[in-house]
Image: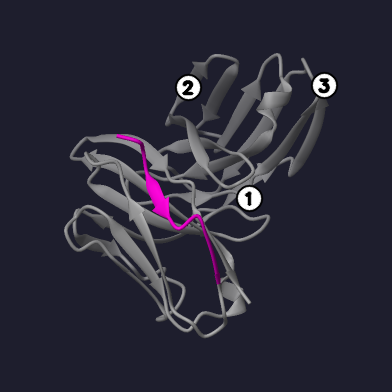
Amino acid sequence: DTGVSQDPRHKITKRGQNVTFRCDPISEHNRLYWYRQTLGQGPEFLTYFQNEAQLEKSRLLSDRFSAERPKGSFSTLEIQRTEQGDSAMYLCASSLAGTGHFYGYTFGSGTRLTVV
Amino acid sequence: KNEVEQSPQNLTAQEGEFITINCSYSVGISALHWLQQHPGGGIVSLFMLSSGKKKHGRLIATINIQEKHSSLHITASHPRDSAVYICAEGGADGLTFGKGTHLIIQP
C-alpha cells in the first residue's frame, strides 16, 4: 500500500467551472476526511466518512461543495461554480477507527486548486 | 469549538539548537497531534498523545492536561528539520488545527 493518494496534484480552472478531486485512502482504513488549507493557515475540516456513510457535512463551506464515497473506498470532492476564494490546498486523510481504538491519521499530499 | 493556538508563528535557529514550539487549546481534548508539513503540502503525523510525553528520535512531545498546553521539542536541530509544524486536537471525528509554526534551521 502506497499511502493516501490524491489526484490531481494541481488543478487550474476558470471561475465558474466545476472541479472534482479524488482521494484513495489506505485500503484498510474505514474513515476518510477532507480538509481545506489556505495560504498561511492551518487546515480546516470539511467533512468525513465512515465507510460509505458521510457522518459530518455541516462544515462544508457552502452548498457548492459536495463529497461522496460511494463504495466505501475512494472519495471525490466536487466544487461547483468555482470562485477565486476557493483557491486552496485540499487535503485528504484516512484513519482506522472503531470502538475503543483509533490509530491516528495518514494524510495525502493534497490537491492545489487555483481559480483564475 | 476548540481554539488551538501555536507560538511562535515563525522561528529561525542555528543548526544544533534546542527548539521548542508551543500549543495551547481552549477546551478538553480527546487527543493532541503534532504534524509536520513540508513545502508542496504533504503532512506527516509525528505524534498523537493524550497525556504525558512521547519521544521519537530527536523529537519529544509533551502535554499538560491541566494547563491545556503541549510542547514539541527538537534536540540537536538540523537543516532537514526545516518545515511547518502544526498542532491539532481531535480524535476519530476530525481535527481542529493551529496555524502552524514555520521553522527554519540554518547551517
Where does the image place residue A52, in percent across and percent down from the top left? 19, 59
Give the residue pinned by disc 1: B99
Residue found at x 71% / y 20%: B78
Residue A55 vs B25, above or below: the answer is: below
**Which residue is denoted by mark 3 in the rendering?**
B107
Q: Earlier in the sequence, mark 1 or mark 3?
A: 1
Magenta segment boundaries in residue numbering = A1-12
Mark in the foreground, 3 or 2: 3
Q: Is residue B30 visible?
A: no
Residue B52, which numbered label?
2
Specify whether residue A74 is painted magenta: no
Depth check: A72 or B99 in front? Answer: A72
Task: State how far apart marks 2 and 1 are (Cα).
Answer: 23 Å
**What is the C-alpha distance between the residues marked 3 and 2?**
32 Å
* Marked residue chain, label 2: B
- Looking at the image, is A64 positioned above or below residue A72? below
- A7 within the magenta span: yes
Residue ID at (42%, 38%): B31
Q: Please give the chain letter of the residue carrying mark 3.
A: B
Pointers 3 and 2 in contact (C-beta within 8 Å): no
* Chain on which label 1 sits: B
Q: Looking at the image, is mark 3 or mark 2 earlier in the sequence?
A: 2
Q: Quadrant of residue B57?
A: top right
Towards the viewer: A107 or B88: A107
